[in-house]
Amino acid sequence: MTIFPIYEDALELRNVTEGMFPFYIGVHTIAGYPVHHHEFAEIGLVLKGNLTTHVNGNKYAFQPGTLFVLLPHQIHDFSADTDSSLELVCCMFDIGILTDALLESDLSALLLRIGDDIRPYVHLEGEVLQTIQNIFLDIHREFASWELGRNSYLRAKLVEAIMLFIRANTTTKHTIAPRAAEKRKDTWKLIQYVNTHYMQDNVTLELLSSMFHVSVPYISRSFKELVGQSFLSYLHALRIRRAASLLASTEMTVSDIAAEVGFESFRTFSRVFKELKGVTPSDFRQTVGGRH
């Protein structure tokens, strides 16, 4: 039987419906969780148990004190290393919350690289671990209340947690290189839209120009300045990253994967995949030992 990653409407499953602040926090005790993805971002902390997870086809070991961040549609799973259960505190949120918080361009650029050249986790201990535990405790208390300014408080604490993750992650220590700090936050909304909708085959410069009321040349310049790549290169990188994860973690055919990640042409998919990964999709699947 073919294995497909589960699409989870993460917030609706937790009764966060349209019109409500797109945010959720909860503590969950689980034995594991199958391969899945969701359109919302996630930040969480392992409270109990050792687990193995796969994010975008890469295998990681998490333990108590591991803080992790997952971006929209990054394919992942959780499995306990023993028969004991896992305890996690997880925040699910619309990534637009961070844009609305007026994040500086260097932080936004780093955020969107998590899962690529920035690893999606960091192990914390001592005072830093206590700090993130207190942040999650504050978030949990505020989420359960309806005090004045509740949403602003949740947003501020979320930014604090993201900042702690980035500062504690050794892979970001020497990578902060601000680009075009004067760019409007609307530009980041555009880039984040691509990060959430890149699987749709109609994501084009012309569509973005119409949606965000800016010119095609402006969008092209913005991608170069803010993420260091052309629009098409950035779009292809997102799609191939997802394709590699599907090849490693599912039994989907290569042609189904090409369509799933947004390529109208299988030939184009194969060419771009080999350009970025150095091997064909089929050879990649054999190399990583994916299901086939």
Image: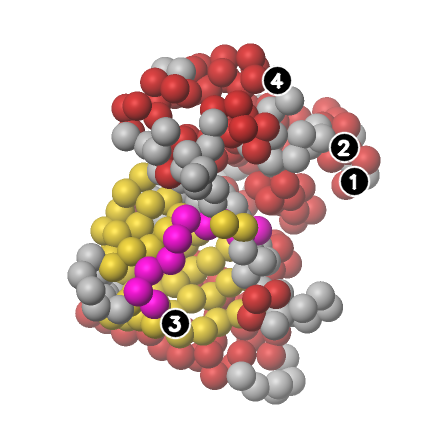
Q: Which element type, helix, strand or loop, lies under badge 2?
A: helix
Q: Marks 1 and 3, Cα distance to the nearest angstrom?
A: 38 Å
Q: Marks 4 and 1, Cα distance to the nearest angstrom?
A: 25 Å
Frontmost of labels 4 and 2 is: 4
Q: Please tell me which residue lies in front, 42 or 32.
A: 32
Q: Amino acid at mark 3?
A: His
**Tags 2 and 3 touching, CB below 8 Å:** no
The dot on residue 211 is 1
Residue annotated with mark 4: 265
The dot on residue 28 is 3
**Residue 18 visible, this orientation:** yes
Q: Amino acid at mark 4?
A: Ser
The part of the image, by quadrant, that contains residue 16 is bottom right
Residue at the image position 61 percent from the left and 17 percent from the top: 265
Q: Amino acid at mark 1?
A: Met
The dot on residue 207 is 2
Q: Which element type, helix, strand or loop, lies under badge 1?
A: helix
Residue at the image position 29 percent from the left and 29 percent from the top: 288
114 is within the stretch colored magenta: no
The secondary structure that dominates the magenta segment is: strand
